[in-house]
Image: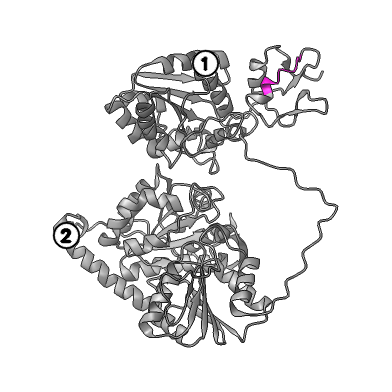
């Protein structure tokens, strides 16, 4: 049995931050879990999914990969209103999708603990923006907790369920990439028996948010916020470390960097640190007392200056006579708004220990003995590793076939998934992207506005997530473009999670398979065709008919992701090799598809790495000299 399912307590286990979240939820008796996967949160639902079959009856829970974050939150809300402890997980941009129900769920409230995980991604490791979701707590009026590492993640997750029940509200828990992916020894407590049967008490004037009801519910939410503020003022998650007349206010992963810097600077008796773990509602009285106890304050927070601006306002209200620095400099007494304020910390990207230490030393006028950098003399630079579609990826074959048919002038809206890498040369077939599902909806506008041939791309999981409504709109409004649905049989980019289009029989976890072609035809698309992208000539013929069709046409390019296929449908194919006697150096194989299994040797000749080649035969089909052949089997 997995260590995360250890029923007894009293031991420590080395856990990833995301695993610690799972353990905390299990120790809280979570009964219902929903998600849409997205880095840096993906390991949380993936772990719940993996554990559910091993889980003994007394602690068993329900888990699902929902079609999108809005659906995940609404499904979880139903369970929480019916009295089951629930958890809903997503990445930061997923909260944008879930924002519609989130705002009103705050009014309605819950009858059992409900925790909503928002995993933010400073520095955009795998995201289209680095929005700061602390704003969602302020917008919705929901309490926000910000753990700083795996051990605290487990405890805070567990506490969040209790806090939710105390307030009758969902609780937001915000993490960032470094917190999700850190490792730390985590102490375990006993797992309780899970309550898996709920009861819904009808109360339409509580749960049906027509205006007359919502007016009263808003007042109820405001009262709950006042209660949450009182709890925040007393919470141990808002803690002061050290002593001195210099102060730092910090939250999230930055807490770790600040405490390390205090040690490195030898300033434990000079710098006092206020750590905000229960960061909304802000404990204003505690902050005011802190400000009055120091001469100078630095606010260290990744992302937007949310706490910094609040601290400045609190300082003005309470009459604290200390300068406040952070992303700007707030002087006492206040200076004119026209005065240029020096900036210390950035609103963009992740922080790191060295940056925080240097800023603290500069701001507080402390000497620092920075460690001498390790000499890299004589060590060659690491080779560049730009992102690339895997060897044998069917998306590459689809891109090639479409480009050969429509040429370089067509417009290609794209979407969120592995295929977004079609942006890179030599494929260069990604022209517009804003969010999941946007490829379908934006195609109508681009096609109408430009009159150019528009061929857009979307993955199978993304199609179910948010492509359906855009396609309905396109059919209804008589748009004119071709949509290519790249059906690789899994949600590949985030770790091969199932989606409604996946045949899960091979995973031993059967769910109802939704046929994409039937769905598309059911939405009213008149021209629908399914292709096998590695059959290049027949694929190109089908693509030509689709792009010639006047109106909305859909191509479903159907081929398993090769990495996923190793698990569910392993096949042994012989790798291919270039025959040097037949190769004339056209290099179409490299210049048009850029498969990572192919390279140029010292003489500038095309070669294939047999350890990477999976035998998809795309390069063999496009070679004008038929110089690429399968390697002969050994006798």
Q: Which residue is mark 1?
A: 540
The front one of 288 and 252 is 288
The front one of 353 and 205 is 353
Residue furthest to the front: 338
The front one of 314 and 209 is 314
Task: Residue 586: say if magenta.
Answer: yes
- Label 1 sits on a secondary structure element that is helix
Name the disc covering residue 213, or none. 2
| Residue 446: quarter of image | top left
Main SS, magenta residues: loop
Instruction: Tell me which segment is drawn in magenta.
Output: 583-589
Q: Assign the C terminus to one quadrant of the image.
A: top right
Q: Position of residue 384 (x, y in %)?
A: 71, 42
**Image height check: is 23 above or below 478?**
below
Q: Is residue 112 visible?
A: no
Q: Position of residue 329 (x, y in %)?
A: 49, 73
What residue sits 14% from the left and 59% below the top? 212
């Amino acid at each position: 049995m997995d260590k995360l399912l250890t029923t007894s307590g009293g031991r420590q286990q080395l856990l990833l931050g995301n695993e610690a979240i799972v353990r905390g939820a299990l120790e809280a008796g979570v009964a219902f879990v929903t998600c849409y996967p997205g880095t840096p949160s993906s390991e949380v639902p993936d772990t719940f999914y993996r554990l559910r079959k091993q889980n003994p009856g007394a602690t068993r829970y329900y888990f699902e990969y929902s079609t999108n974050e809005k659906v995940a939150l609404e499904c979880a809300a139903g369970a929480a209103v019916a009295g089951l402890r629930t958890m809903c997980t997503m990445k930061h941009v997923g909260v944008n999708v879930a924002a519609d129900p989130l705002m009103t769920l705050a009014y309605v409230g819950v009858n059992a603990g409900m925790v909503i995980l928002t995993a933010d991604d400073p520095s955009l490791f795998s995201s289209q923006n680095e929005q700061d979701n602390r704003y969602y707590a302020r917008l919705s009026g929901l309490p926000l907790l910000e753990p700083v590492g795996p051990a605290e993640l487990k405890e805070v997750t567990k506490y969040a369920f209790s806090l939710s029940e105390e307030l009758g509200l969902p609780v937001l828990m915000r993490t960032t990439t470094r917190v999700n992916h850190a490792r730390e020894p985590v102490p375990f407590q006993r797992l309780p028996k899970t309550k898996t049967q709920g009861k819904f008490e009808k109360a339409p004037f509580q749960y049906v948010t027509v205006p007359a009801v919502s007016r009263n519910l808003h007042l109820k939410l405001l009262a709950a916020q006042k209660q949450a503020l009182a709890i925040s003022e007393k919470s141990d998650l808002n803690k002061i470390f050290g002593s001195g007349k210099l102060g730092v206010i910090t939250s999230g992963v930055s807490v770790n960097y600040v405490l390390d810097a205090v040690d490195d600077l030898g300033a434990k008796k000079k710098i006092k640190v206020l750590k905000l773990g229960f960061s909304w509602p802000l404990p204003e009285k505690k902050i005011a007392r802190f400000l009055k106890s120091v001469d100078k304050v630095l606010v260290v927070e990744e992302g937007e200056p949310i706490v910094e601006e609040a601290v400045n306002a609190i300082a003005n209200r309470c009459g604290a006579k200390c300068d406040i620095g952070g992303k700007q400099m707030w002087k006492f007494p206040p200076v004119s708004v026209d005065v240029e304020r020096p900036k210390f910390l950035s609103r963009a990207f992740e922080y790191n220990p060295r940056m925080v230490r240097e800023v603290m030393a500069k701001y507080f006028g402390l000497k620092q003995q920075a460690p001498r950098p390790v000499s890299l003399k004589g060590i060659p630079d690491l080779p560049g590793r730009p992102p690339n579609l895997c060897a044998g990826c069917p998306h590459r074959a689809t891109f090639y076939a479409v480009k050969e048919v429509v040429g370089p002038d067509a417009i290609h809206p794209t979407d969120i998934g592995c295929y977004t890498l079609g942006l890179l040369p030599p494929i260069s077939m990604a022209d517009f992207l804003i969010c999941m599902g946007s490829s379908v909806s934006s195609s109508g506008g681009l096609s109408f506005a430009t009159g150019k041939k528009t061929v857009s791309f979307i993955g199978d999981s993304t199609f179910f997530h948010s492509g359906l409504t855009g396609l309905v709109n396109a059919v209804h409004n008589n748009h004119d473009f071709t949509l290519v649905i790249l059906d690789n049989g899994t949600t590949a980019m985030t770790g091969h999670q199932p989606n409604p289009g996946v045949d899960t029989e091979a995973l031993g976890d059967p769910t109802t398979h939704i046929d994409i072609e039937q769905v598309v035809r059911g939405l009213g698309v008149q021209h629908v065709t399914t292709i096998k992208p590695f059959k290049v000539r027949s694929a190109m013929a089908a693509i030509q008919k689709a792009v010639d069709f006047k109106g909305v046409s859909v191509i479903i390019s159907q081929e398993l992701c090769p990495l996923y296929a190793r698990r569910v449908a392993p096949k042994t194919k012989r790798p291919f090799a270039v025959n040097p006697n037949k190769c004339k150096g056209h290099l179409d194989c490299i210049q048009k598809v850029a498969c990572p299994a192919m390279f140029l040797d010292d003489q500038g000749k095309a070669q294939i790495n047999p350890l990477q080649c999976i035998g998809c035969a795309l390069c063999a089909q496009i070679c004008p000299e038929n110089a690429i052949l399968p390697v002969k089997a050994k006798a």
